[in-house]
Image: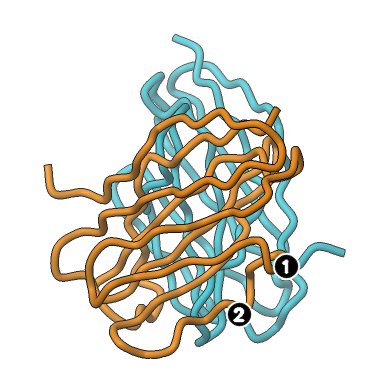
Chain colours: A cyan, B orange
Amino acid sequence: QKEVEQDPGPLSVPEGAIVSLNCTYSNSAFQYFMWYRQYSRKGPELLMYTYSSGNKEDGRFTAQVDKSSKYISLFIRDSQPSDSATYLCAMKTGANNLFFGTGTRLTVIP
Amino acid sequence: GAGVSQSPSNKVTEKGKDVELRCDPISGHTALYWYRQRLGQGLEFLIYFQGNSAPDKSGLPSDRFSAERTGESVSTLTIQRTQQEDSAVYLCASSPGRTTGRGQFFGPGTRLTVL
């Protein structure tokens, strides 16, 4: 079993839709949770960072962490064509390396 | 721009040859990471440098892989006797310090193809 599981999609939605992206994990020691966005042929860029359980909102993006269920989510409101990318969840304990999901490819159709 | 840069952007090599990949981190960032991203898979941690401390090499898949970093500047990842399964995008990231999860800044990657 992988430490981080993420549905690879692909996911296609119409412009303006609410998008829900999710990851599950098995290591209860994970404390830091991140979402990265990766455009084609580019490196990942950090979108959201959350410590422990709870919600965090930044503009159209909301990250949720439920440590009791080992489940994290990213919601995108009023999705735009420019949101079309691969979204990667990542998490870590206090140690050095990040553990990534495989990424979900999202396409927002105008 | 002052982002992380990597070179070359693409590298095609023959099986058995050695390759060197280069990473220039953001100036002032003391932490540097190498990851591998195979097609359809998530990023796989390879190695981590923090200042002058001994690197964390726990993610290197075999002794054919090695990396160096001079001080807090450029890093090179070397793959000896390349194999076809080494084909992947190799990503470098840097961060301001011993990150507590505030995120790492990634370069565009080097796409390695081993024929």
Residue B34 place in picture, x, y as percent: 48, 60
| Secondary structure state at the residue bearing disc 1 | strand
Residue nearest the viewer, comparing A91 with B51: B51
Tell me the chain of label 1: A
Quadrant occupied by the C terminus of chain B = top right
Q: CA distance from mark 1 to mark 2?
A: 9 Å
Residue nearest the viewer, comparing B91 with B68: B68
For the residues labelled 1 and 2, say whether their Cβ atoms are less than 8 Å apart. yes
Residue placed under numbered mark 1 in the picture: A25
Quadrant occupied by the N terminus of chain B = top left
Residue B20 place in picture, x, y as percent: 46, 49
Residue A65 image-quadrant placement: bottom right
Please give the name of the residue rendered at 30% of the width and 87% of the height, measured from the top-left corner.
Answer: B52
The amino acid on which the numbered mark 2 sits, given as a three-letter code, is Phe
- How packed mark 1 is, by other alpha carbons closer than 10 Å (few <14, some 14-19, many 20 or more), is many
Above or below, B91 relative to B104: above
Of mark 1 and mark 2, the one earlier in the sequence is: 1
The answer to whether residue A70 is left or right of residue B37 is: right
Above or below, A102 relative to A52: above
Tell me the chain of label 2: A
| Secondary structure state at the residue bearing disc 2 | loop
Residue A27 place in picture, x, y as percent: 72, 79
* Residue furthest to the top: A110
Residue A82 place in picture, x, y as percent: 36, 23
Please give the name of the residue rendered at 40% of the width and 65% of the height, measured from the top-left corner.
Answer: A49
Please give the name of the residue rendered at 53% of the width and 77% of the height, measured from the top-left corner.
Answer: A53
* Residue furthest to the bottom: B53
Task: Name the disc covering residue A30, or none.
Answer: 2
